Structure formats: structure tokens, C-alpha cells
Image (spheres, rainbow, N blue to C red):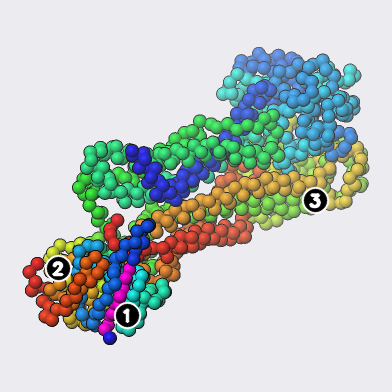
Amino acid sequence: MLLRKMIRDMKKNLGQFISIFLMAFLASFVFAGINAEWYGLQTEAGRYYKETKLADIWLIGSSFNRGDVKKIMELSGVKDVSLRFSLDFPTYSNKDKILNINVIEDNTLSLPKVVEGSPLNTTEDGIWLDQSYAKANSLEIGDQIQVEIPGTIFKKDILGLILHPEYVYSSNDSGSFMPDHDNYGFGFLYASSLPEDLSIEYNQILMSIDDRSNEEGIIAIVENMFADRFMLVINHDSHLSVSSFNNEIEQNKAMGGVFPVVFFLIAALSILTTMTRITNSQRTQIGALKALGFSKNKILFHYVSYGIWIGLLGGLLGLITGPLVIAPILFIMQKSIYTLPKWSIALSPISYIIVALLALSCGLSSYLACRGQLKEVPAASLRPKAPKSSSHSRMEKSKLWYKLSFGIQWNLRDIIRSRIRSLMAIVGVFGCTALLLFGLGLRDTINKVSDWMYKDLNVYEDKINLDSHTFKEDIAEVANSYSGQWIQESPIELKSDSKKENGFLTVLDDGDEIRFEDVQRNRISIPSKGVGISYKMAELLDVKAGDNIEWRIYGQKDWARSEISVIYRTPMGQGIVINKDVYEDFGQSFNPTSLLTSDRIDEDISMKAIENIQNKNTLINSFNELLESIRMIVLILVLGAILLGSVVLYNLGALSFTERVRELATLKVLGFHPKQIRSLLSMQNIWLTILGIIIGVPIGFWLVDFMLSTMPASLDMRIFISIKSVIISILGTFIVSVTVNSLLSRNIRKIDMVSALKSVE
Amino acid sequence: MSFIRFDKVTKDYVMGDLIYRAADNISFDIEKGEFVIVLGPSGAGKSTLLNLLGGLDYVTEGSILIDGNDITKYDEKALTIYRKDSIGFVFQFYNLIPSLTAYENVSLIKAIKRDTMDFNEALSLVGLSEHGNKFPSQLSGGEQQRVSIARAICKNPKLLLCDEPTGALDTETGLMVLELLQMLSRQNGQTVIVVTHNAHMALVADRVIKLRNGKISEVVTNQSPLSVREVSW
């Protein structure tokens, strides 16, 4: 019977319960959607890594042999060890395209996953090719491709198309974080199928270990074991693909935790105000129920169940629909960056816990709302309630108070008297502003990075990358044809007193094709003494200008020690920059890896030294693709913001209207014009909207900043939100607020003066 | 011509299929400065009469002349102005704004009208000059009702309309309120119309209009009305 009463009560307050339901729904919709996305990625990646037996540790060096494998196998904690040869080569059909060629034997670790064609088999003669690369270049099974391994060029049939766990994120370039499947791919072939006269030196050892907690110890032992050789050790944290993908998951996890908070808060607060009002208006009913002999707990449970039902229903609906709507939208964007065999959604247990929490906190809010009513003795609750007490707040003691108009006094008092309602309005409004600003700001920031990177810092048009093992005379050929700035880019290890990081070294020859800016974005030049360090790297290493750092190129044995002369800021490719002269003072020889040029370049040039040519426009285009996919997210955020703002404000407006209907009727009887009453009501709305916006703008900035802080270590994006976006967010919030208000003020005309004044509720 | 003339006024309420006639062909006159009691049991149509007079509702038939103007011809806007300029309302349940102090409840009139009585004067007239800074919740029922009277009279209304003003009060406070209303009529020449079901009140009025089932049963003009304290309650 009480259940029927609940349903009827809900019908009577349909607007409010719908809005609570919507907020509970949105909270769980967003949370579950994002949760299903990242948890799905995590589960799928875990399964993929396990299935393909992804290695735990990679040793990169040279001349590894069976003896080394045997030695490592004997270490305790090591499960499995494999040898591999892996290097990037240009495909001779096209200078721009690079294939990472991997030669394996009967390996057991980091195996490719064949998605089409013959399964892996040591006796097959041919190559298994990256599926994405094959697709982008319209290559099919049975086609022949050219393969280069130092000294030899040979042709191989494509046996199958594959994915590989080390290429979930594949990028061969520090200047772009979008993968370029058209120009970069990988292939696997067995050593037995190599031309007989060719002997290769394995340059990688792959290891798997029993227990990740032993990792550090094993790495230390291995490093020591091969101390006499140049070697680099990589684990999951430093592996480009594995760590980038983990970063992505972490980033989404963080995002999914932040946004639903606003909706969660609003749902709980709405139910608090609504239930307070319902139990207030039903106090005589409560008294009657008590008089009939219902126990206090029974009545309490009845009202608490309102909140629990609403929270549960909204939460469950969100739990079902969120993963089906939000996850696929996020997947669209991720599919352009990551390659996985399967994209599936999976809900982590946290999602269910959140829905339960949602229902519980709605129940708790209901409990808090009706607890007070139940304290009274039945006789007291059968009588009408004494008017809500008011008191003078401190501001009223000032002289100024008496000079304020009646409308201002009335609204100020009303705000103070209904604190929770006002608080909710502010939360709703700042949520609306912050979400709008976040969406637009994210777009602005990424837009700006493109300009910053490709217009302000990299002023060159083309980057001609040189083959890593070319001869001086071949380089001369390039130098004779094109002018520009020569640079050397090498991956390095960096060390401060307390920290160790991986990064890039850029050695600069004379020229002005690549520019630098300090933290405030003023143009600076790299001094002819010491090294310049990127802002993010300086932060990671916890160093500042004037400190010393140590660095060494991968594979080298000795550390160089340099003083930091300047800190520059760059969005991509964190590390250090050094002038050629300083570099050579270390006894190093300058081996240019690229020529940065603004000369016009023929597309089909063929020079021996040139590995490939990167055109800036290609990079900008791939960046724009990313922007395209961000547009979808911006749209969701904008819709969410509008929904949040309008639902909260409408709900509160309706609530405050019903609470004050007697006062409004009185004013009407006294001869106040409906227009005056409307402006009285909208005054409060406008104040709270302004207050909400004032709080919302910095929160929007903070959200963008927070989002950027979850970006991978190699990226350093600076928050940039255009004035236009700020204005749009503020204006948008205002429009929502004003629209809702004008919808509500239609009711003023409908107030029936006679019946509203006749009796006490 | 009388100050107020009700001329064959009929008011029907339509409730679903039923038509309820709350006022049936009512005619009467009231002179300026009179203290009038409208008497009758509940459901007799007293409040309907008052609401029509106060411009809160429309007649079905007939006309109501106030100072020579037919208010039944007014549209909503004109009625709002009429309420603002000519009418002071006092309700059974006071209808004060709980978030405003006594003084502020009175002074809110300045938001709609310029030529008002001084608000402190209005408060002292009802004997509450000491309590202007209190909120309704800090005042007794009688005090709240007196604030609502102060709010009504500070407009300098042509008509003071009171709907069961003592209905929610105990006898003693009720008497004080009634005394106040009578004093306003006698000393200030204020036209006061009080709706009640308390037959004793008829003795203090200049004119008594008795209603029964929506019709006038009797109109009595009292040549020598008693003062409130002379009546044995």
C-alpha cells in the first residue's frame, strides 16, 4: 500500500523525480560508459598480451647469441628468453615508407597474431606483414614485397597479415603522435627463410619473468652481466607502445572519475530538497500514519525507499546504456591511434559499486530529509507547522541593508534560508559552465598545439630523414641539392641526482628552421654553452637552469655531464638540445640524421642517403584527424552541460515556485504586476547563475589542466582556452538559465490568488 | 450614489459538470467610512463577495460600482492597478512573507506604490512600532495579523477588506484586532468590510449584510453601534 503511495507521490512531483532520475542516470551513464571503455581496453590488452606472450623485458644491443640466452635462462625468476633481429628499413619501392623488419627463429615470446593467411610456421618461406600497413598500401596475401636487410635486398611473398602486441601504438617519429600506417609498418619472417649467404646478428633479447615484482632485481643482474657491451634495457614502463597504451587507459580512468561527480552531487542534493518538501507537505499524513500505529522505522523506510528506487533505477539504466553509447564513441577516436585485435566493452566491478553507492546516497539524502519530521510526537505533526524561523544575518546589521530594495532583501533572505537549494543551483550552473569550457578548451588546446608545433617552432616545410648508415659522400649529394639546417636526433638516457628518464637529444647545426621558446612562450636561442632542456623533462628530472645533468646516447657506455643553460618548452619529443660545437667538444662526432628545409622538394626524388621525407602538411593533417575525433567528445560534453544546467535550474525553479506560491499570490493580491513578480523571481536566478559561472570558469580551466596532466610523459601540452570559448561558455550558461526562467515564469499568470491564500497547506 | 454598489451580482463556479452558484443576484450599497460586517455560515458566499469586491475574481453577471467605476469591466491589468491603488487586504492566515521582517513586510509596498503612509507610522498605528525588526516567526498570531493590517492600510486604500481576520486567533487577540479595525473606521474614516461567521460582531458594525446560500437574507443598518469592549463575548 505504501508502495502505491510512493508511486502516486512521484507522479504528483513528476518533474522533480524525473530530474533526479536523469541526474542519477547521467552520473552512472558517464561513469559506466567511460569505465566500460577503459576497462574493456585493459581487459582486451591483457588478453592480447597474454595470448601473444608479450615479453616483460627487452634487451636492445648487438651481437646477441645462443650463449647469452642460455646464461639468462639460468637466472632465477626468468621464465622464457628469445632472440630477435629488429630494424627499420626503407622499402625501396617508395622512399617515404618504412618497414620494421623482424627476424625470429622458433621464438616463444612476443609473437605476432595472424589475422589472415597462413599461421606462423618456421618452415614457411615468406613474410607476415602488418595488417594496417597492408591495408593502407592495398597489399594482399600472395603479393610480393621488397625487403632490405643490411647488404641484401630480396623479395618475399606475403604469407599472412598480422597484428603485434608491441605495435598497439606504433610511431616511428617523435614529431607526431598519430600513427601513420601508410608509411610505417612491420613484418616478421623466420631466419630459415633468409637468403643463404646472409648472416644476421641478433640485436634483441626478449625475456619473460615469473613475477613482475622481481623485475628490478633481474634488470640489475642482466645489466651487470652485459656490462661490457652497449645495451639498453626496456620494460613495460619504458616500452613506447605498452606504456602509451597504459597511459591512455590511465587517462580515461581519471577522466571517468571526475565528470560523474557533478551529476552524482546534483542527484543527491536534488533528492534532499525534493524529499524535504514532500515530507514537509505530508507531515499531517505522517502524523496520521503514526496515529494509526505505524512504527517510526516503517515510515522512515517508506521515505528512504523513494531515494533508493530512483537512484537504483537511474543508475541501472545508465549502467546498461552508458557502455553501449559512450564507449563506442571513445573507441572511434582510439581506433585511429591504437591497433587492437578486438575492441570490446567490459564493466569493472567498480561500476556496480558506484550504482549501489548512488542508490545508497539517494537513500541517505531522503533519510536526512525526513528524519526531522519523524522526531515530533504524532500530535504535533498533525498540527500545521510553525513558520520557518528566520533570523538576522550579519549583513543585515549594516546600514546598507536598509537601503536595498524589497526585491533584493527578499531574494537575499530566500537564498540564505534555502541554502541547499541555492547551493544546488550553483553546483548545477558551475557544472554547466565548467563542462562547456572543458569541451571547448580541450579543442582550443589541441588546436593550439598544432599551430605551436608546426607554425611557431618547426618553421621548415620538409624534414629529410637520412638513412642511418649512409656514407659522407651520399650526404654530400643531399647537401648539394638542398639547403637548410642539419640536425642529429638520437634517443638518450638522462640522469639527474635523483631521477632517470628516457628522452631525445637534438644536436643543432647552423640554421633557423627549428625554433625554441621559453616557458612564457618568448622566443629564445640555445646558448653556445651547456645544454637546453625541455620544460617537461626538467620537471620529470626535477632540475632547473644552472643544475647539472648527465646523459648518454643509447648504446654508449659513458655518461656526459652538462650544465643546463636554458629551459625551453615543446609539446612533443622531450629531451635536451645542444649546439653542434658544444656536442663535438664532448668528443662526439656530429652525425646528422635529418635535414630541415624549406626548399621545394620533388616528390619522386631518389638519393641514396635519403630514407624518407616528412612533409609538414602530412603531419598537420594527421593532427587534424585527431581534432575531428575530439569534436565528438566536445559535442557530448556540450550536450551534457546543457542537460545538467537546464534540468537542475528547472527543477529548482519549480521547487522554489511551489514553496513560494503563497508569497507570490500575496504579492499578486497586493497589486504587484506579473512582470514585477517575474523580475523578482529571475533576480535570484541571475545572481546564482553569475555566482555559478564565476566558480565554473576556473573549474573548467582546471579540468582541461587536469586532463593534460594525464597525458603521456612525452607530451607537454599547454592549456590554451580562447577568449571566444570562455565567452561562449558563459553566454551558453546564461542562455540556459534565462530560457529555463522564462519557461517557469509562465506559471505566475496561472497562480490562483483565491485558493492559494485560503488555507494553510 | 453610494460609495460601493453591488448591482444584481451573480457568480457561478463550474466544477466539472456541476455549476455551483456562490452568489445569487446580490445587490447592496455601502457608504464611505462605514464599518461593515458580512455575516453568514460557511458556504454562504461571504468570501466570494469579498473576492469579487477586491478584484480577485470575475462576476458571472451584474456590476460592481466603486466610487462610480464599474470594476466588472476591468481587464486583468486594470484589476491589478485597482488592487494596487484602491484595496487593502487582510487575510485569515496573515500571508506575511516569512523571510521579511515586520517592517519589511509593510515597506515592500513601496515597490509598487508611491503615495503611501509612512511605514513606521503604519506600524505604530497597529501598536507594533517596537517590533518592526522581528520576523513573522518571532511574532504572535495577533501581532502577525496586525502587521498584515499595517501592510494593508499603508497603501491608503479606498477599501479595507478583511476575510475572517480573527478566525485564527484566540478571543482576546481577536478582540484587539477587531478594535483596531473599528478604530481605523471611526478615527480615520476608513471604509472597512469584515467577513465573519461570528454573529456577535454584528453589534459593532455600522451595517451588517447577512448572507445565506449565496443570497442576501437581511441588511441591517446599525444606528448606534457598540464599541468592541462593550460587547460581551
Query: Which quadrant holds residue B195?
Result: bottom left
Residue A596 in magenta stretch: no
Residue B142 seen in render:
no
Residue placed under numbered mark 2 in the picture:
B199
Q: Nearer the viewer, mark 3 or mark 2?
A: 2
Above/below status of A10 relative to B154:
above
In front of the other: A176 or A736: A736
Give percent across and percent down for residue A683.
Answer: 44, 65
Residue placed under numbered mark 1 in the picture:
B65
- Chain identifier of the residue bearing label 1 in the image: B
Q: Nearer the viewer, mark 1 or mark 3?
A: 1
The local secondary structure at tag 3 comes to: loop
Above/below status of A508 relative to A113:
below
Quarter of the image that includes the N terminus of chain A: top left
In front of the other: A376 or A424: A376
Cβ atoms at labels 2 and 1 below 8 Å apart? no
Mark 1, residues whose alpha carbon is within 10 Å: few (<14), some, or many (≥20)? some
Residue placed under numbered mark 3 in the picture:
A460
Residue B73 horizontal side relative to residue A547, left or right: left
Q: Earlier in the sequence, mark 2 or mark 1?
A: 1
Residue B120 horizontal side relative to residue B229, left or right: right
In front of the other: A278 or A266: A278
- Chain identifier of the residue bearing label 2 in the image: B
Give percent across and percent down for residue B55.
Answer: 34, 72
Q: Residue furthest bottom?
A: B1
Q: Which residues are magenta?
A: B2-11
Q: CA distance from mark 2 to mark 1?
A: 27 Å
Numbered tag placed on residue A548 in the rendering: none
Instruction: State whether discs 3 and 2 lie on one chain.
Output: no
Quarter of the image that includes the C terminus of chain A: bottom left
Residue type highlighted by circle 2 = Ala
